[in-house]
Structures are given as C-alpha cells and as structure tokens.
Amino acid sequence: MREEIRKALQEIVGAKNCRDQLIDLVSYSYDASDHAKRPECAVFPSNTKQVSRIMELANKHRIPVIPRGAGTSLTGSVVPVMGGIVLDLCKMNRIIDVRIADRLAVVEPGVVYGQMEKELAPHGFFFPPDPASSQVCTLGGNVATNAGGMRGAKYGVTRDYVLGLEVVLADGRVMRTGTRCMKSASGYDLTRLFVGSEGTLGVITEITLKISPMPKAVKTALAHFESLEDAGKSVTDIMHSGIIPSVLEILDENTIGVLRERAAMNIPDIRAMILVETDGYTDGEASFQMDKIVEIFNRHGASFAKIAKTAEETEELWQARKSAGSVAAQLRPNNVSEDVTVPMSKVPELLTRISDTVRRYGLPFVIFGHAGDGNLHPRIMYDKSDPEQVEALERAVEDIFKLACDLGGTLTGEHGVGLAKAPFMHLEHDPVAMQTMKALKETFDPNNILNPGKMGL
Amino acid sequence: MREEIRKALQEIVGAKNCRDQLIDLVSYSYDASDHAKRPECAVFPSNTKQVSRIMELANKHRIPVIPRGAGTSLTGSVVPVMGGIVLDLCKMNRIIDVRIADRLAVVEPGVVYGQMEKELAPHGFFFPPDPASSQVCTLGGNVATNAGGMRGAKYGVTRDYVLGLEVVLADGRVMRTGTRCMKSASGYDLTRLFVGSEGTLGVITEITLKISPMPKAVKTALAHFESLEDAGKSVTDIMHSGIIPSVLEILDENTIGVLRERAAMNIPDIRAMILVETDGYTDGEASFQMDKIVEIFNRHGASFAKIAKTAEETEELWQARKSAGSVAAQLRPNNVSEDVTVPMSKVPELLTRISDTVRRYGLPFVIFGHAGDGNLHPRIMYDKSDPEQVEALERAVEDIFKLACDLGGTLTGEHGVGLAKAPFMHLEHDPVAMQTMKALKETFDPNNILNPGKMGL
C-alpha cells in the first residue's frame, strides 16, 4: 500500500480503523470458501460519509475495494483476488429504526442476522430468510448475496424483503433506492439490482427491510421412504395439493448412510427422508396442512411418517437434518457445499443424476436440501492437500453445475456466484444476458474497482 | 411513415399486421389516461423473432417503439408522445406452459389477466396481484408497470411473482433473464430491472410467473367509524397484532358522502369505513384472524362492525367499496384516479391532509384505497373542457404528490409513472438515483427509441 493512500485512509477512518499488519492481511485473505488472497489493507468505516470518501479515493487511484460483512461466503465472494482495500462494515451495525405498524426495519449493513431476530422477537415479528449462518452473518451480506434458508418455499429469500437501500457508488456518490412503503411502481427497481450484486455495483450502507409476523403455530413431521421415486412423487403431490410447507427438507441415501454409520441415531436403511413443517396462526391451520401432507406420504408408501406431538419429539425429528452437514464433514479434512437449484419436479432426477455422476470420482458425498423450493446442497468431502482429490472435486462440482443447468436449474439458489461459480455463469445465462450484466457492471463501475474479478464479469 | 419503413414492417409482420389508417392512429393515440398523441403506425407481431426484427429496424432508423398491452394505463405510459411505431402485443397471447408441481406458468405478454385466472382456477392456483382492470389488462402490461391490486398487503405485487423473462433489447438482441426455479442468486437481477420499466428498456416477449395456491377459506367484515383517527388506530393495531389481512380497504368521508347522496345504499353519516378480508386453508384460521381484527375495531369505538355469514352478506359488505369509483365518477364528465402510497401508519394523516388541501380547489373528490399497504387512490372529478377546472386539477394532483412524498411516500403504488408522474420524479428520488436511472436507460437504449419521453428519463 502506497504511503499516500495509507495516510489518506487513516485520515478518513482514523489510524486504528485502518489495518495492514500481517495478521490483518491474513485474516482478510479468506472467507468460508477455499479461496484466498491477501488484500493491501482493511478499513473499518463507521458511517456513510466515510464510505463515500473511501470510494472517492479508491476510484481516483483505481484501487480495488471489497465490501465485507462477516465473511461467511461459501463462494469466495469477499476474497480480494485483485488485492486492494477490504471494507469491513462490521462497525456500521446499528438498528436504526423498527416500525412495526409500517412493517419495516431500517438497519446498517453490519447488523448480524441473529441480532435483528432478537430485536424483532418481542414484537412477534421476524425477518424470514434465515440463512444457516444466521448467528454470525450480517444483513449487508444477506442483501449482497440474496441469501436464503430453509423457509424459502413459503417465505421467500432476502430479495423479497428489501424495500430500499442507501448505496455508495463507485465514485463516492450516495443514493437512496426504493421506498419505505410496502408498494412502489416509481422508476427502475434500483433496489433489487443491488440485491445479489455481491458488492460489485456499490457499497450498501443502509437497508430498509420488510418484516413479517412470526407464525404462532407450527407442526413438524418426518417421513422415511424405501424409494427415492416415492419421495419425489410425494413432493410433487404436495405442490399439487396447494399446501406450501414452511420447511420441506429432503435427505438422500448418501446422507442417510453417513448418519447410520457415524451418528448414534437409530435410522433404518432407507433411500430418502423428508422433514416437513407447516405453520399458521392456529393449531388447526398447521394441522390441516400437515394431515394432508402425511396423507400424501402414506399414499406414496412411506415406511414411516410421524407428526411430532411435543417439543422433544420435534427436536428428535429434526436431529438427522441438523446433524447431516457436520457428521458428513468428519469424513475428510475439507468439504465443499454446493447450492444448485432446479424446478421442484426435477429434484428426484437431480438427486439420482448427481449421485450417479459424483460417485465415479471416488470422493464421499451427501446430498440434502430444500425440496420445497428445489434447492439442493450436495456436499463433497475431500483432502485439500491431495492434488488428485482436488482435481476430482473440481470435476465433480463442474458436473453438478452442468446437471442442474441441464434440468433448467440455476448454479446457485442462495450462496451467490463469487469466484466459485464465476467460470460457469455461461452454462446458465445466455450470451446476451452475460453482455448485459457486463454492461451494467461497466455503467456502475467504469474503473472496475468494486470487488473486481467476481461473478464472471 | 416513410414508404421504405412501412414496406420493411409489412415484410416482417405481413401487410394486415401493419396498420396506419386514420382510425388506427386515433385508436393508438391514447390509453386510459387523459394523454394523447398519434403514432405513425401500429404493428402486431406474433412471435419474438418478429419483435427482434422490428427493433433492429427501428434502432437503425431511430424510430420510437412503444410496446403496448391492453392500453389500460392510467398514466399515459403507452401514449406515443414522440410518434413512431406502436408495438401491440395482443397477438402474442399464448399460455405456453402451466407447471403446478413447479409452481410456475410460462406465458406470452398478450395474455389477459382474466384468461390466466381461468386457466389456473381448476388447479386451485392463481396469480395474486389482481389489478382492478384484471378482466382486460395483459400480463405484459402488469409486468411492465409492476401492477398491484387489493390483495397487496398479504400477497404482494407483480414483481414478487416474476421469475424470469424473455426480452428483446433495443437493438434486436434477444435475452433470457432470471430462472424457472423458485430461487436463484446467480448474477444481477435483470428480471426485476424490467419489471416496472414501462417498456423503456426492452420489449418483454415471454414471462415466467410464480403462481400461488388459492386461499380456501375467506372471511369478510365491514366497520364504520365516527372518527378517522379511530379508523387509523385500528389499522395500526392490526399491523401490531401480526395479522396480515388479504384485503384492508379504507373509504374516507368524501367517498361516504358521495355514496350517501348518490347511491341507494343505507350508509350512516360516518367519517370512515374499513372493509377487511382474512383467509387461510381453514375456516378456523380465517375466523381467528377476523375475530382479532373485529376486537380491534370495537376497542377503537367502531359504531358498526359485522362479519359476513353468507355469500349474500359478503356481497353486501363489499357494495360500498365496489361502487365508490363509479358513483363518484358521475359527479363530473372526467376524473383522475391517483395512486400515492405512504407507510401504513401515515394513512390517516395523508387522508386528512389530502382532504384539507384538495378541498381548496373546489373540485369534488373522494379518497379510498388499500390501507393494508398504504396505497390510496384519491379520485378527483372535473370537466376537461373547462380550463379552470383543468388547472385546478393539475395543482391538486401536484399537491397530492408533495403530501405523499413529505410523509415518506411514493408517487405511485401500482399505476406506474408514464407521463403523468414524470415531472414529479425528483420529489421522490434523489439526484443520484435519477442520474442512475438515466444511465441505465442510456445503457439499454442508447438511441432512446424505446417508449421515449416517459418516466422523467
């Protein structure tokens, strides 16, 4: 980092908020993916004005700026592949306003999802997307990656809850997008252009979120299937029934095998497991939906189907799903969790084809995910220190992307593109769509300083 | 129209699908607003290839192209203010695919909303936005204006249901945006950039819509209030209660006055009326929500509150709301229906301030709208042939925009910007947001041929 730049940054954020010791550079070289590259420094702005001045400086000197939340990205989206300044927004963590009667909350990007949850709970409200990293990830990161979670089928993803933003553009100009109303048809949807843009179009400095009443009554059930086909038919029939479960998780035979071998759970040798939740204001509503679903499970020959009657039973039914990731991760030192999504009716086919394909590479893997919105997380275990395993992993992942796109799917349901999926964007998006995304990037960031090298742009 | 261009258009769509007789030019000079200007011709493409060739031609010769659905715009958004070619998409009206298990439908832009409703109903599904013009308006128009309706509070607007698009760009290139999955975090959200862009960024030639199960159980109630303040407190308390009604309509004292004078309805001399609907899979769920709401009405001194017990009673409770617009319209030869939206807690204040302000102009007016999402439709009656009334109307409308923006609101909840609100965009959007919208317009349409002169761009 040139002395002149360091001094200018220190002048903006104060010396202690501008770090470039080795430990800082190493800390900010990685996220939750396998990618890594050191930045030149990390700065900690505490307000929009500072972010604006940093961007102005960086734009003038053509220095990459990588906005960063909690660094939980699974795709390398906050790895500073071209060096530059990591803009850590963790100090901009105020919940500015919670307006229940207007169904909204105004927050800074560094607010942790779990902190928001706690703030809203006493009002009986929540912000539904609920990513798996909810206790550490930031709302800014949620917006930047259009994060989602297990409740997507019924409650949607982050995009569905962002009403408006304050954004600092590449040259330091500040703008407000969107609205603080529930509805607006006024001008281009700038807000959603930034949702999922992974810090490549601007720095999000304030978020207005729509919030939702927490469901009061919840029912949970678990079903076992001797054949994947029957599990798939059940999912299709649930969709046709018009019931939208709040959770509809599927675990494949690989996952079940690992749990049987490695966990102290008493699971029979079955081909698929489905965990489901329904909700409503009343017990009657949640039960009505669940009864229909269990009827569908039974019609398709479920070998076991149980609705939890107590909190303990609920906990028990969730156990396999909750343990799946961590138990599987024990098989090898490293693992990659993929995130492909297909139309719901293609879930069984995707499960089978991924299994058949990935098996050939000799790496252990499991597949589970959100059957209710078609979002599967194949997880492949490997040893990073073994080049052969790394190569096998890379080929397996590429095959998974191809299979998903072949079935009309997407590379990523909720993790984003980052570095990991950048080389495969053309599998999903046609040349004109890619040209258009590039044109947008150029319009917003002509000097390519905002999180450069990401998303295949 | 130059002979060379006419011939080229005829060659693309066939002679009978390219019209420029006086009757055609007059027909395509207006929409459902008061704006009018004749185009040079109207063409009727029947597929994407034809649209692409038309755009290529128009771009080469710098001829404006105005994509048009059913022309129900209330803002002049399909009026060809700069002449050119009206691209009537009514012949592209195929429902291409309905995939219930995948919760989606693929349609051409000319499909009428009501036609879609009929197609989905036997499956127990619907496309929720439900604009007031649903029996005539097209889905392409719904997407282009981000249309909404009475169910917005619970079910959202068009934007929430568009998964992907096929779009023809200004130079004739064709691209697919988005996905046919429920979820995707793959690249910039090109899809929603086109939602609400009113034909200024590209021509939508195919739409993939998310569909929803139709609610099975519905409860309807009506309440009368002696004071607007009490009605407002009720709305606020409903929001705090965590109940999201599927309908929450408010009628102000002006509306009630007109209905009392002009309609054969037995309505007492009250200050506000609220119509509400709740829904669910079960009667119990709909009733639970409605009982809470009626309890809130009573707590705030409603002089009347009734839950309908039969279909006839439901019809009866809806009567005032359904008649309000047409009864008011009888007062003068012309009327304008505005569409401002504010955060829900500001609805009573907006009602009072609009009343106080508009009253001064001496034109009859009524205000009703969707209290559940803050979207009000002040309707002002006037005589177009009287310049004084026209001036009064214009000043009143401008005041309404200012009042809404003052309260943190938006110029338009669901009608769009078009010509009517173009001069007022700066009231709502800051200079950088306006610059950004202009930069987007230039990126997508450098020759400014796509519906030019709209949206203040």
Image (tube, coloured by chain):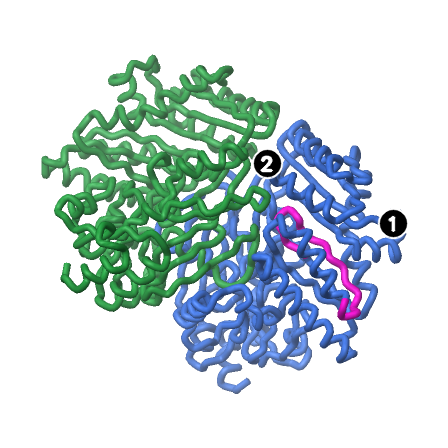
Chain colours: A blue, B green
The numbered mark at residue A230 is none
Q: Residue at x 34, y 33 (%)?
A: B351
- What range is drawn magenta here? A360-376
Q: Which residue is mark 2?
A: A242
Q: Are discs 1 and 2 located on one and the same chain? A: yes
B171 or A1, which is in the foreground?
A: B171
User: In the rendering, at what x and y percent does residue B173 appear?
Assistant: 37, 65
Q: Is residue B129 above or below residue A420?
A: above
Judging from the image, mark 1 belongs to the subunit labelled: A
B289 or A53, which is in the foreground?
A: B289
Q: Residue at x 70, y 48 (%)?
A: A249
Local crowd at mark 1 within 10 Å, few (<14), some, or many (≥20)? few
Amino acid tagged 2: Gly
A391 or B304, which is in the foreground?
A: A391
Q: Magenta span has A371? A: yes
Q: Magenta span has A58? A: no
